[in-house]
Amino acid sequence: MQEEALPRVNEFRRFVRVMLSRGVVVFGILVIMATIVAAVFAPLVAPYDPYAQDLDHVLQQPNSKYLLGSDSLGRDTLSRIIYGTRITLMVGVGTVLIAASLGTVIGLIAGYLGGWIYTIIMRFTDGIMAIPPLLLALVVAALLGTGVKGVMIAISFALLPGYIRLICGQVLSVKENEYVMAAISVGVSKISIMFRHILPNCFSPLIVQMTMMMGLAILIEASLSFLGLGIKPPSAAWGSMVYDGYKYLIIRPVLSLAPGLAIMLVVFSFNMIGDGLRDTLDPRLRGTI
Amino acid sequence: MTTYIIRRLLHAVLVILIVSLLVFFLMRLLPGDPILMYVASGDLQNFSMEQVEHLKHELGMDKPLIVQYGDWLINVVRGDFGKSLLHGYDVLEEISHRLPITLYLGLIAFAIGCIVGPLLGVISAVRRGKWLDTLVTVIANVGITAPAFWVGIILIYVFSLYLGLLPVYGYTSPFEDLGRNLQQSIMPIFVLATFPVASAARQTRSSVIEVMRQDYVRTAWAKGLSERVIIMRHVLKNALMPVVTLQGMLLRNIIGGSVIIETVFVIPGMGKLVVDGMLSQDYTVVQGVVLVVALTVVISNLIVDILYGWLDPRIQYD
C-alpha cells in the first residue's frame, strides 16, 4: 500500500512565521538589531566621546545636553552606554562561540567514542559544574588578569561544561540511528561520522543553547565588572558603570539605573529569541505551531 | 535503593576529588606566582630573592606540583585548609564563621524558590493565556534577566535611601538581635530568591502545560473530576519532577549569587570572603572557599538525586 504523501511545508517560511508570531520574540530581535547597529556605528550614534572628561559638568542631571546625565568625571552616560554595547556583544557572542565550539568537539568525542574517554571527560565536567559559574569565572578572570581577553576566556571556561553535556547527550541518542550504523558498516571514518553525520543533528539544541547562554555570559561579565574583577574602567563596560554610579546613588540614581536597564534589556532579548528558537526548532512542536 | 545511594556517594567523592584537583592546579598553572604576589602586595617588598626562596621552602612551594597537591589534600582531609597568605588567619576557622551566614540567607532564598516558584508556575499554566499568566510570565522573565547587583541597588535606593524603611547594608546574627537581622536580611534574601523563583516558575509552567496534554489527564477531565483534584493529584506529581532536578542547580546558583549579594549588602559571608580573597590574591583563602562551595553543591545535588529516585519510581537504580 502506498503511503499518503505528506503536504510539502517550506521549513524556512514556517520558521519565519513561528518566530515572528510572538510579540516578545520580535521585540527581542529588534533590541538586538538596535544593539548591533549601536555597536557598529557607535562613533556616529553616540553624542559624545565616551572617554572625554568634562570636569565643569560632572554628575549632571539628565538634561537636553546629557540625555542620561554625566558621571563623576563629566563623561556622557548615554555615549558610554552606546559604546558599552561593543563590549557586551563581543563578550556575549565571543564567549559563547569559544565555549560552544570547544564544548561541541569535546562532547562529540566523549559521546561517540564512549568508554573510558567518556568517563574521564564527563567526570571532569561534573567537577567543573560543581563550582557555580560566576565563582568559577571570577577565579579564572582574577588569575588571568582583567581585560576583555581574560574575561572572555574565564566566562567561556565557566560555560564549557554545559555544552559538553548537551552535545554528549545528543550524540548518545543520535549515534543509535540506523544511518549512523550504515555509515559505520560502509567504512566511513570516525571523524567523518562525528562531524558529517552526527554533528548536523545536534545543531538545533546547540543554537538554542547558544542564544540562551549569550544572556548568561553578558550577566556574568557585568557581574565581574561590577565586582572590579572584570573589564576595568575607563572602558565603558555596563557592569562597572553600574558600580561607579552606585557611589552616587543618592544624588544621581540614573548613573546606576540606566546601564543596569541596558544589561537587562539585552539579556531579556537574547532569552526571548532563545525561547522563540526553541519553540520553532523543537521537532515535537512541528505541526502544532 | 541502597546500591543506588552508595553509587551516588562514590560519585560525589570522585567529583570532590576532581574539584580539588581543578582548584589546586588552576591556582598554580595560570600566570602569576602567588608567593611573589604576596611579597609584592604586603609590607615585604624589601625581601631578597633568598628570603623569597626560603619562604617558598617554608610553605612547601618548592616541591613538585603533584607532591604539593598531595600534601594540600591530606591536610584538607585532616581539616587543615592552611593559613591566609595575607592576613595569617586559619582559613577553615574563617570559613566556619562565614558559611552559616551564607547558608542562612541562601537556604531561606532556596525555600522561597521551592515554594513560590512552582506555585506561580502552576497558577500561570492553569490560567494559560489569561492576564494572570501574562503577569507571571513577565515577572519570571524579568527575574531571570535582571542582574542581581542591579536589583539590589534598586532595592537599596527605594527602601533604604528613599523610603528609609530598611538598613542599607550590614549583618547581625539572628541570635544577637532577631529584629535587626530580619530588617537587614529582607533585601538580600529577596534578591537571592529572585532567580530561583523566576526559573522555577518558568520550568513549572512549561512542565505543567506539557503534562496537561497527556491522555491520562484528559481521562481525568472526562471522568468529571474537579480541576483542583486533577491538578493536585494527577498533574503536579509528574509535572514537578523536572522542577526537583532544577532545584539542585538553583542552590548552586544561589551560592554563586552570594558573591554578588554579600558584596552589595556588605555581608560577611563566604561570597564576600572569596571576592576579598581574589582582589587581594590570597590564594589559600580562595582555594578553601571554592572547595567548600563545591562540597556544598555536591552534597545538595546528592540529596536531590536521592530525593528524585525516591519520588519517581520509574528511575532505575542499576
Image (cartoon, rainbow, N blue to C red):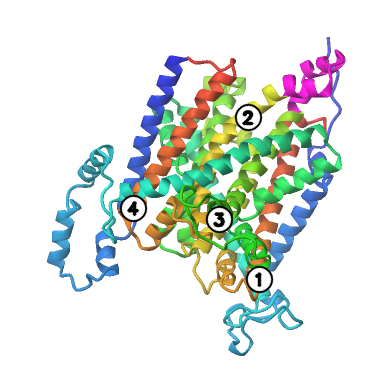
Residue A112: give x, y in percent of width and height. Answer: 49, 28
Contact, mark 2 vs mark 3 (Cβ under 8 Å): no
Span of residues in magenta: B210-235
**For the point 21% across and 42% down, which residue is it?**
B71
The answer to whether one can see residue A18 in this image is no
| Gap in angstroms between the C-alphas marked 3 and 1 | 22 Å
Q: Earlier in the sequence, mark 4 or mark 2?
A: 2
Classed neighbour count for the residue bearing mark 1: other residues with Cα under 10 Å, few (<14), some (14–19), many (≥20) = some
Q: Name the mark nearer the viewer: 2 or 3.
A: 3
The residue at which mark 1 appears reads as: A253
Label 4 and label 2: CA atoms lie apart by: 36 Å
Q: Which mark identifies residue B285?
A: 4
Q: Is residue A100 magenta?
A: no
Q: Position of residue A276 (x, y in %)?
A: 74, 43
Amino acid type, mark 2: Pro
Which marked residue is nearer to the observer: mark 3 or mark 1? 3
Q: CA distance from mark 2 to mark 3?
A: 34 Å
* Residue at image point 44% right, 45% down: B100
Circles 3 and 1 on the same chain: no
Chain for numbered disc 4: B
